[in-house]
Amino acid sequence: MVAGEASGDLLAGLLLDGMRARWPGLQASGIGGPQMAARDFQAWWPQDKLAVRGYVEVLRHYREIVGIRGELRQRLLRERPGAFIGVDAPDFNLDLEVDLKAAGIRTVHFVCPSIWAWRAGRVEKIRRAADHVLCIFPFEPALLEEHGIAATYVGHPLAAVIPLVPDKAGARRSLGLDDGDDVVAILPGSRRSEIHYLAARFFAAALEIRRARPAVRFVVPAAPGLKPAIEEAARAAGAGSVLQILEGQSHAALAACDVTLIASGTATLEAALFKRPMVIGYAMNWLSWRMMRPKQLQPWVGLPNILCGEFVVPELLQQDATPEKLSAAVLEWLAAPARIGAVHDRFLALHHELRRDTRALATDAIEKVIQA
């Protein structure tokens, strides 16, 4: 198995639970993170080696990443596992899966690459790479099957983990927050490159919000290994005394908050499953942005908006992700309880749609691939 970042590590950990229940003697190894390690996964390399986003950012780490993939390929071809499961990280996993499948090793790709959002031409590589694709969104299997790719909708694992009715009061108690507080959760990303481009903007926005509403409380859950970088960014922004920076605990922060200022990515779907209004922000190296933007197939970037088919929550990207615009959008949510109620109902309906027995459905599909 290979999971290339924090969100993939979480998904892979949930998948490992299902596979170990089916096959108690399962041996799993490859590239993973702490969630996988907690399920007795043997990580030959840590997942943060692959946690890089953007063309320019990848180029800086290209030789190391290609070297890891080459070593992993040779080891898997030599040891010939019963199956290889690539969890997201398509830029790394699909090329690896092409070679493994050609050598007769069964391959499963967990999380359909976003061919419906951008890079539609990638579908041919998926066909050559994966014996089966496990899809987390309900519209994806039909799209893949049009191109001759076997696929199963397994639901989104997070929809089964996150409760339909989050315990907001309990989460606030755990974080030392009062029931009457206005709370903003700030999630500036799970990659170092995201912290580099987003943390200063998000923390400057927090200071703007604080000036308008002095009683607002801010919680900042730090992804594994990123707390020192976030603390340094907070000090540099002059926001160190304003922010409550947490070690992990993103779900507690999302459950506790009234609104979240959040980096585009899987975390936005988690926020939607917690029924929280949000402001989605994102920025990256300008050249990466120029290269990626023309390949976008839909007007939305944030997963909640893509799944709902409209701008349910605001997106402020690249040059629009200024502290002034970010803070204004957060303040608009805090001043609009009726709007918050409407988005809560929309996200609850989405939660029901994504809630399936992912562990069992995914394990069933993997078993069929192995036995084919």
Image (spheres, rainbow, N blue to C red):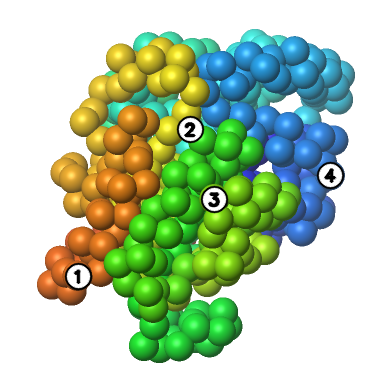
| Secondary structure type for disc 1 | loop
Gap in angstroms between the C-alphas marked 1 and 4: 49 Å
Mark 2 vs mark 1, foreground winner is 1
Label whose residue precedes the other's in the sequence (2 or 4): 4
| Secondary structure type for disc 3 | loop
Check the image and report above or below for 353 versus 251: above
Q: Is residue 366 left or right of residue 127?
A: right
What residue is at 67 percent from the left and 63 percent from the top?
247
Residue type marked 1? Ala
Quick one: 314 or 348, which is closer to the camera?
A: 314
Viewport quadrant of the N terminus: top right
Quick one: 51 or 70, which is closer to the camera?
A: 51
| Secondary structure type for disc 4 | strand
Mark 4 vs mark 3, foreground winner is 3
Q: Mark 1, residues whose alpha carbon is within 10 Å: few (<14), some, or many (≥20)? A: few
Instruction: Give the image location of residue 74, x and y in percent.
Output: 83, 16
Q: Which mark is residue 133?
A: 2
Label whose residue precedes the other's in the sequence (3 or 2): 2
Q: Mark 3, residues whose alpha carbon is within 10 Å: few (<14), some, or many (≥20)? A: some
Q: Quadrant of residue 352?
A: bottom left
Gap in angstroms between the C-alphas marked 4 and 3: 39 Å
Instruction: Give the image location of residue 40, x and y in percent.
Output: 81, 54
Residue at the spot of label 1: 335
Label whose residue precedes the other's in the sequence (2 or 1): 2
Instruction: Give the image location of residue 147, x and y in percent.
Output: 34, 17
**Res 13 seen here:** no
Q: Mark 2, residues whose alpha carbon is within 10 Å: few (<14), some, or many (≥20)? A: many
Q: Which mark is residue 237?
A: 3
